[in-house]
Image: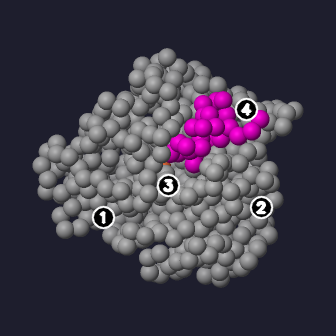
């Protein structure tokens, strides 16, 4: 069966206007409208922020990609990403975040690169493939599901990928991970419960953290006791997959807890008013609406305990979706995160019915902090860290739970030439000196989220490479992998891996070091 992907339909389905995409905070992650299609139903290829969400649908395999420049000999491992790539044309009321997870891998060894992509064979993907049509039409809304999928996992596995215990985990925050083979990208288990240590219905964050000392994975799941529940389960899983610790806490209201932070001794949450809207879901809408009447809550509790020491600090309505880094120092806990004054996703409804607030969706990097001793219901402190609009900030991931110094991000040009809203820069930030260095690509190049790859497993923080995907608006979205020296990003790529095709869509990605792969058979 053939299904024609109509790009205009997809854009309408995503509910994103050109303006919203250009200016929105996750504009970086939203399709952009751009100029009218050339006609004839050919997919429209546009410049701007939305290139990285352009649907593709083709699984691709290329051995020995063409390389421009030289891949450093010590750069061995894999750059994995995932993003939503609709299996069938979407319901007009659906949003871009509901496409099926399409994973891609740049596998780098001894200066050679192979490229491979595979859809995650989630239970949803397999059922829809068999039926030849969409069976779960609306983002995280089980009320609208076809009766035939009752009891199946709703995961799209479209948000993030991390390595764990020799597997690649493809994540969607409403479900357990999907486990894939690190080399072939074959789906091994679409509902991976770490050997029945988690229930099949366990929500599992797309942003687990890895302990800087033990390598253990710390993760959480919100709505842990069913749709709209205010229970959050938090757990720590060791490097061979044993659950060491779990506790459950209550949040002030059920909302999108997309990311969190883990420090040496604490787990921190930032509760933002993107609320679970059951009434809207029953009317056929998506899972969320933005309720600007609700305050935000910054809270933390000790790792390894029962969660009863949980303390909350309040602030006005705003959002913070992605953590750059977090640490504790002299009795305070610091969370470095991108913050928007309003609804970060212009394609998600406002509860008061107001139109998309474009300026309110623009994020900048902030530091939120509070005293570890502090009392109940007091305010948290917040300050601007960097004026960069960087909704997808990253760090050297060996420092997830440690006192870190360097951040990295794709971002739009802070001083853009008129009419050029493209996300075409890569920044390296130094949180000690509060300064940053910037590489500016061409205005026709859209840069996806970056990952950091250390020079060696024990290299000092920030010594290594930045990897990112670039989509060329002037080449039908043909894409490159760019590799930069992380200490000299302003010098631009030291190598480019040229794909003959458009890269599959991308939200997040991870660098898997060679030492994290299972031992190869001789
Ligand atoms: C995000 C992405 C999602 C989602 C919820 O980047 C939040 C934020 C790709 O799906 O479902
Ligand atoms: Fe995310």
Q: Secondary structure at mark 1?
A: strand
**Mark found first going from the N terminus, 4 or 1:** 4
Of labels 4 and 1, the one closer to you:
4
Q: CA distance from mark 3 to mark 2?
A: 26 Å
Number of callouts: 4
**Mark found first going from the N terminus, 2 or 1:** 1
Q: Is residue 340 visible?
A: yes
Q: Position of residue 483 (x, y in %)?
A: 64, 71
Asked if the beta carbon under badge 1 is closer than 8 A to the nearest atom of ligand 2, the reply is no
Which residue is identified by label 4? 8
Q: CA distance from mark 4 to mark 1?
A: 44 Å
Q: CA distance from mark 4 to mark 2?
A: 25 Å
Q: Position of residue 18 (x, y in %)?
A: 64, 37
Range covered by the magenta-colored residues: 11-36
Which residue is identified by label 1? 327
Give me the disc on residue 390. Answer: 3
Q: Are marks 1 and 3 in contact (CB under 8 Å)?
A: no
**Mark found first going from the N terminus, 4 or 3:** 4
Q: Secondary structure at mark 4?
A: helix
Q: Neighbour class for label 4 at 10 Å: few (<14), some, many (≥20)?
A: some
Location of residue 503 (image quadrant): bottom right
**Mark found first going from the N terminus, 3 or 2:** 3
**Mark found first going from the N terminus, 4 or 2:** 4
Vertical relation: 1 (above or below) 454: above
At 57% across and 27% down in the image, what residue appears?
A: 138
């Amino acid at each position: 069966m053939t299904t024609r992907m109509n790009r205009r339909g997809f854009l309408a389905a995503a509910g994103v206007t050109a303006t919203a995409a250009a200016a929105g905070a996750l504009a970086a992650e939203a399709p952009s409208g751009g100029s009218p299609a050339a006609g004839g139903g050919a997919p429209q290829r546009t410049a701007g922020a939305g290139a990285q969400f352009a649907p593709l649908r083709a699984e691709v395999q290329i051995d020995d990609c063409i390389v421009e420049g030289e891949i450093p000999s010590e750069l061995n491992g894999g750059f994995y990403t995932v993003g939503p790539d609709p299996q069938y044309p979407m319901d007009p009321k659906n949003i871009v975040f509901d496409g099926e997870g399409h994973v891609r891998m740049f596998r780098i060894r001894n200066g050679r690169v192979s490229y491979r992509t595979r859809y995650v064979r989630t239970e949803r993907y397999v059922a829809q493939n068999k039926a030849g049509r969409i069976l779960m039409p609306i983002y995280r809304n089980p009320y609208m599901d076809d009766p035939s999928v009752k009891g199946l996992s709703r995961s799209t596995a479209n948000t993030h990928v991390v390595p764990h215990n020799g597997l690649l985990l493809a994540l969607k925050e409403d479900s357990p991970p999907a486990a894939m083979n690190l080399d072939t990208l074959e789906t091994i288990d679409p509902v991976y419960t770490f050997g029945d240590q988690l229930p099949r219905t366990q929500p599992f964050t797309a942003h687990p953290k890895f302990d800087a000392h033990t390598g253990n994975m710390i993760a959480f799941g919100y709505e842990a006791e069913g749709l709209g529940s205010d229970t959050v389960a938090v757990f720590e899983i060791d490097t061979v997959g044993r659950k060491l610790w779990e506790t459950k806490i209550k949040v002030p209201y059920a909302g999108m807890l997309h990311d969190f932070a883990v420090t040496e001794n604490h787990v921190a949450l930032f509760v933002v008013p993107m609320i679970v809207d059951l009434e809207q879901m029953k009317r056929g809408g998506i899972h969320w609406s933005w309720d600007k009447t609700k305050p935000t809550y910054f809270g933390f509790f000790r790792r390894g305990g029962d969660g009863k020491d949980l303390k909350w600090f309040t602030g006005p309505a705003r959002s913070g979706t992605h953590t750059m880094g977090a640490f504790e120092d002299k009795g305070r806990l610091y969370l470095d995160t991108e913050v928007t004054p309003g609804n970060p996703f212009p394609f998600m409804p406002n509860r008061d019915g107001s139109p998309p607030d474009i300026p309110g969706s623009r994020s900048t990097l902030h530091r939120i902090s509070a005293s570890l001793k502090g009392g109940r219901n007091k305010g948290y402190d917040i300050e601007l860290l960097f004026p960069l609009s960087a909704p997808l900030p990253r760090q050297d991931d060996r420092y997830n739970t440690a006192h870190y110094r360097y951040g990295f991000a794709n971002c739009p040009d802070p001083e853009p030439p008129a009419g050029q809203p493209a996300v075409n820069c890569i920044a390296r930030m130094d949180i000690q000196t509060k300064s940053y260095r910037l590489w500016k690509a061409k205005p026709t190049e859209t840069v996806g989220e970056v990952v950091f790859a250390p020079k060696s497993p024990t290299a000092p923080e920030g010594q290594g490479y930045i990897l990112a995907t670039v989509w060329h608006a002037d080449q039908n979205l043909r894409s490159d992998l760019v590799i930069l020296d992380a200490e000299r990003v302003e010098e631009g790529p030291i190598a480019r891996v040229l794909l003959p095709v458009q890269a599959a869509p991308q939200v997040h990605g991870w660098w898997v070091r060679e030492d994290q792969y299972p031992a190869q058979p001789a």
